[in-house]
Image (spheres, grey):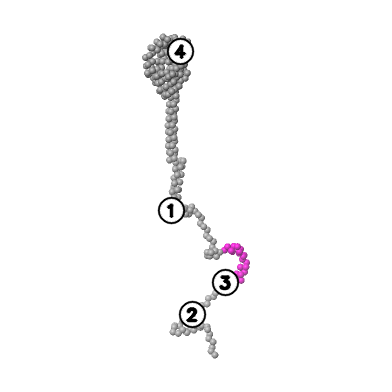
């Protein structure tokens, strides 16, 4: 009966043929380190230690496990970061950045120009006040001159009408007893062609008044300015008169409408009659 082979591999010294004999190995035995303290003391110490709070234990995470680690806190935002972000946005959008810069510059310029304390605005305000003052003075001068002219013209018209009233009364009021004095009043108030004509016929008038024993006295009913300025005027005067003579010793009423042209005489300072005519 064949013998059962032992499957255990055995290393037999010098079994390898053709090779050098293996070096002899030296076995060194090292004692295992014993526990720092007996196992019974370790177990007893663990039994005496307090049990951990399950809530606190649940908060613990495995060091180095990225899935369980808390998220790192976000850094605080600063003005520098904000300005950097704005600059980055501007750089990302060149058109928007240019427009914003233009708008910001425009607003700044307008704000600076509108500041009430700036020298430019002060000079502009002074210039405006000077222009307004000059305009006010010019307007006052024009208005004052016009007011003066209008007032002087009105005054001249009133004086011309008064002179025409007196001249008309002087012309129709004559008496044989005072003929020279009456004719002299008419001559003194005349000028120009009228004065020349009346002076040439003065002798005939005087003779007729004396021969007919004329006694005439007149009064003005109405007088009105027809036209005129400060040196010339035309006035219409309505005069009633009572005339006595040798043919009408008791007197008879007469009504005259006389138009007088008057001229301002600067030498005498009076309105003088340059023309006299009966108009009905």
Q: Distance between the residues labelled 2 and 3?
A: 31 Å
Q: Quadrant of the C terminus?
A: top left
- N-terminal-most mark, 2 or 1: 2
Answer yes or no: do the residues labelled 2 and 3 have beta carbons within 8 Å?
no
| Residue 270 visible in the current orientation | no
- N-terminal-most mark, 2 or 4: 2
Residue located beneath label 4 in the image: 243
Q: Kindly state the secondary structure of the residue where label 4 is placed.
A: strand
| Residue 54 figure quarter | bottom right
In the rendered structure, find residue 25 and report the number of the disc placed on it: 2
Percent x, y of residue 141: 43, 30
Residue located beneath label 3 in the image: 35
Percent x, y of residue 229: 42, 24
Q: In this picture, which residue range is highlighted in magenta?
A: 37-60
Name the residue nearer the viewer: 204 or 156.
Answer: 204
Of badges 4 and 1, nearer the viewer stands 4
Answer yes or no: do the residues labelled 1 and 3 have beta carbons within 8 Å?
no
Name the residue nearer the viewer: 204 or 102.
Answer: 204
Residue occupying image coordinates x 44% and y 32%: 136
Residue occupying image coordinates x 53% and y 65%: 65
Q: Distance between the residues labelled 3 and 4?
A: 177 Å
In the image, 34: left or right of 276?
right
Residue located beneath label 1 in the image: 94
């Amino acid at each position: 009966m064949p013998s059962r082979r032992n499957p255990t591999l055995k290393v037999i010294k010098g079994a390898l043929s053709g090779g050098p004999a293996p070096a002899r190995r030296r076995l060194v035995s090292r004692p295992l380190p014993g526990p720092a303290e007996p196992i019974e003391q370790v177990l007893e110490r663990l039994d005496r230690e307090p049990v951990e709070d399950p809530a606190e234990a649940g908060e613990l995470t495995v060091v180095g496990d990225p899935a369980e680690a808390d998220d790192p806190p976000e850094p605080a935002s600063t003005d520098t970061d904000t300005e950097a972000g704005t600059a980055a946005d501007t750089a990302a959008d060149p058109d928007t950045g240019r427009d914003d810069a233009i708008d910001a510059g425009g607003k700044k310029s307008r704000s600076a120009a509108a500041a009430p304390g700036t020298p430019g605005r002060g000079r502009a305000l002074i210039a405006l006040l000077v222009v307004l003052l000059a305009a006010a003075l010019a307007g006052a001068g024009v208005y004052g001159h016009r007011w003066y002219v209008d007032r002087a013209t009105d005054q001249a018209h009133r004086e011309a009408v008064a002179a025409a009233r007196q001249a008309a009364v002087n012309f129709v009021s004559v008496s044989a007893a005072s003929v020279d004095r009456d004719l002299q009043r008419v001559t003194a108030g005349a000028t120009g062609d009228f004065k020349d004509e009346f002076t040439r016929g003065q002798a005939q008038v005087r003779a007729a008044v004396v021969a007919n024993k004329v006694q005439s006295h007149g009064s003005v009913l109405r007088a009105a300015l027809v036209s005129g300025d400060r040196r010339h005027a035309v006035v219409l005067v309505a005069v009633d008169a009572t005339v006595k003579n040798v043919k009408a010793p008791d007197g008879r009423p007469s009504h005259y409408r006389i138009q007088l042209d008057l001229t301002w005489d600067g030498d005498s300072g009076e309105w003088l009659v340059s023309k006299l005519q009966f108009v009905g």
